[in-house]
Image (cartoon, rainbow, N blue to C red):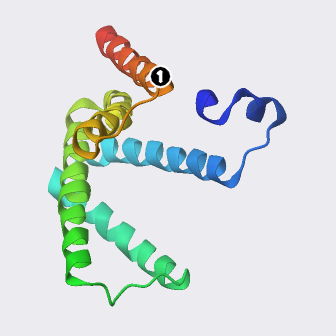
């Protein structure tokens, strides 16, 4: 986090709203993984995923409405894109994460999930013709080394 936001942020304790939202999101993500680990001992992956997604939808729908976000009137192409994102990125991704948490535990899964931005960057090279900066390569390498070290200790 220090590499991303800079060392001065910690010395002066001056976080911007994006930094604070990221910290909050990481705390909620950690809590989710710990709850998932505990609950997955009692219920199957599909039931847990359905319950967590339904809870998220129930909470986020009124938030979206109150925030003034448009919920209807999109083109067919947009609805198809949203459907694909929902099925593949969301549903398949969370099913895989919840299955892994139930089998491996939150500690192992949370460390391996750090590979998500690295994989995204590599896919961006192939599918979007993006290029990586030296700092991207250094950061990605450090993440992969960290994942390797943690998993070797187990």
Instruction: Give coordinates of residue 46: x percent, y percent.
Output: 16, 57
Q: Which residue is at the front of the view, 91 or 125?
A: 125
Q: Which residue is at the front of the view, 8 or 154?
A: 8
**What residue does disc 1 label?**
134
Residue at image position (23%, 40%) is 102
Q: Which residue is at the front of the view, 85 or 49?
A: 85
The image quarter in which residue 107 lies: top left
The image quarter in which residue 11 lies: top right
Residue at image position (35%, 32%) is 118
Left or right of 126, for residue 134: right
Left or right of 38, for residue 45: left
Instruction: Give coordinates of residue 75: x percent, y percent.
Output: 26, 84
Mark 1 neighbour class, 10 Å CA radius: few under 14, some 14 to 19, many 20 or more: few
Task: In the rendered view, tell whether residue 115 sits above or below residue 93.
Answer: above
Task: In the rendered view, tell whether residue 50 sits above or below residue 27.
Answer: below
Left or right of 148, for residue 77: left
Residue at image position (44%, 73%) is 59
Residue 94 visible to an observer of this rendering: yes
Q: Which residue is at the front of the view, 100 or 126?
A: 126
Instruction: Give coordinates of residue 105: x percent, y percent.
Output: 30, 32
Residue at image position (42%, 79%) is 61
Instruction: Give coordinates of residue 29: x percent, y percent.
Output: 45, 47
Left or right of 117, for residue 80: left
Q: Residue furthest bottom?
A: 73
Q: Residue furthest right?
A: 12
Task: In the rendered view, tell whether residue 103 sits above or below residue 56.
Answer: above
Quarter of the image that includes the N terminus: top right
Task: In the rendered view, tell whether residue 146 sits above or below residue 28.
Answer: above
Q: Element at badge 1?
A: helix
Quarter of the image that includes the C terminus: top left
Residue 44 visible to an observer of this rendering: no
């Amino acid at each position: 986090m220090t590499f991303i936001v800079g060392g001065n942020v910690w010395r002066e304790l001056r976080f911007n709203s994006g930094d604070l939202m990221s910290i909050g999101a990481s705390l909620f993500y950690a809590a989710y993984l710990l709850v998932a680990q505990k609950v997955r001992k009692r219920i199957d992956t599909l039931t847990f995923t359905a319950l967590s997604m339904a809870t998220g939808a129930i909470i986020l729908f009124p938030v979206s409405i109150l925030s003034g976000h448009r919920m209807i009137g999109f083109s067919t192409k947009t609805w198809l894109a949203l459907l694909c994102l929902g099925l593949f990125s969301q549903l398949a991704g969370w099913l895989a994460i919840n299955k892994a948490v139930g089998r491996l535990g939150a500690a192992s899964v949370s460390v391996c999930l750090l590979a998500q931005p690295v994989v995204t960057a590599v896919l961006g090279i192939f599918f979007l013709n993006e290029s990586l900066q030296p700092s991207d390569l250094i950061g990605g390498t450090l993440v992969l080394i960290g994942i390797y070290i943690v998993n070797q200790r187990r």
